[in-house]
Amino acid sequence: MRKIIFQGRSKKGTGIVIRYPEMSDLKEVWRYANALSQERTFVLFQGERISLKDEREWLVGCIERNRKKEGVTLLVSTGQNIIGICNIQAKKKKIHKHIGDLGISVAKDFRGEGIGWLLMISVLEEVKKKLKYLKIVTLAVFEENKMARTMYKKIGFKEIGVLPASLRYRGGYSNEVLMYKEMKGN
């Protein structure tokens, strides 16, 4: 039985479901990750082909972290297609265990519909319920990704610094903007 967090419509009327991942999502998550990589957008993969084995390991890790309350990973889908993923993973070292790292992506054809906003709000709410020990959530964003930076600020993230030329991007380098949000009530 799929654990659904949100079911409704985007700003443009796209029917979406935000939910926890399952192993049956493997092939669709793999397709999604490779499509993002080929786009060479503001994500960690820049054209590499991700193997099914590597994607299986990633998905198993996400499901395990969800189960052990070491992270929260949510997917957003429309029909059978995954169109976004967001996760917050607690750091492992004891001195940093109160900090979670956030990652998010939304498929190209669905950006600008408010899906990223709904996905981030959903994952942050799940973290408040399930990972009460997290006090800070951090993220890193390409400096050029102004749309994402604006959204993060509206959600309450604050910029704390820039790591120059730290991201390989489209044959060159990009600055990485570091941001954080305090988890009030945790």
Image (tube, helix red, strand yellow):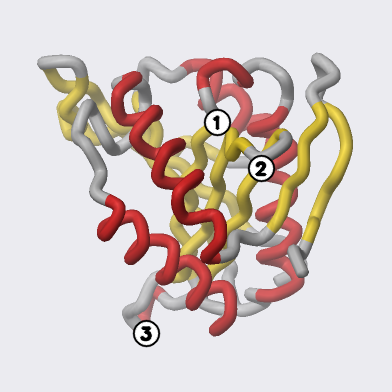
Observer-nearest of 21 and 45: 21
The image position of residue 127, as x and y in percent, is: 66, 65
Residue occupied by mark 1: 106
Assess whether mark 2 and mark 1 are in contact (beta carbons under 8 angstroms): yes
- Residue 124: give x, y in percent of width and height: 68, 55
Please tell me whether mark 2 sits on a helix, a strand or a loop: strand
Of badges 3 and 1, nearer the viewer stands 1
Residue at the (63%, 20%) spot, across then down: 110
Q: Give the class, few, some or many, for how many residues have Cα within 10 Å of label 2's Cα (few <14, many ≥20).
A: many
As helix, strand or loop, the secondary structure at mark 3 comes to: helix
Which residue is the extreme one toward the left? Answer: 171
Q: Do the residues labelled 3 and 2 touch (CB within 8 Å)?
A: no
Which one is in front, 150 or 28?
A: 28
Q: Name the residue under label 3.
A: 94
Percent across and percent down for residue 78 are 71, 34
The quadrant of the picture occupied by the N terminus is bottom right
How far apart marks 3 and 1 lie (CA) works out to 32 Å
Instruction: Give the distance between the C-alpha atoms of the residues marked 3 and 2, in whole angstroms.
Output: 31 Å
Q: Name the residue under label 2.
A: 76
Distance Cα–Cα, label 1 vs label 2: 9 Å
Residue 143's disc is none
> What amino acid is at disc 1?
Val
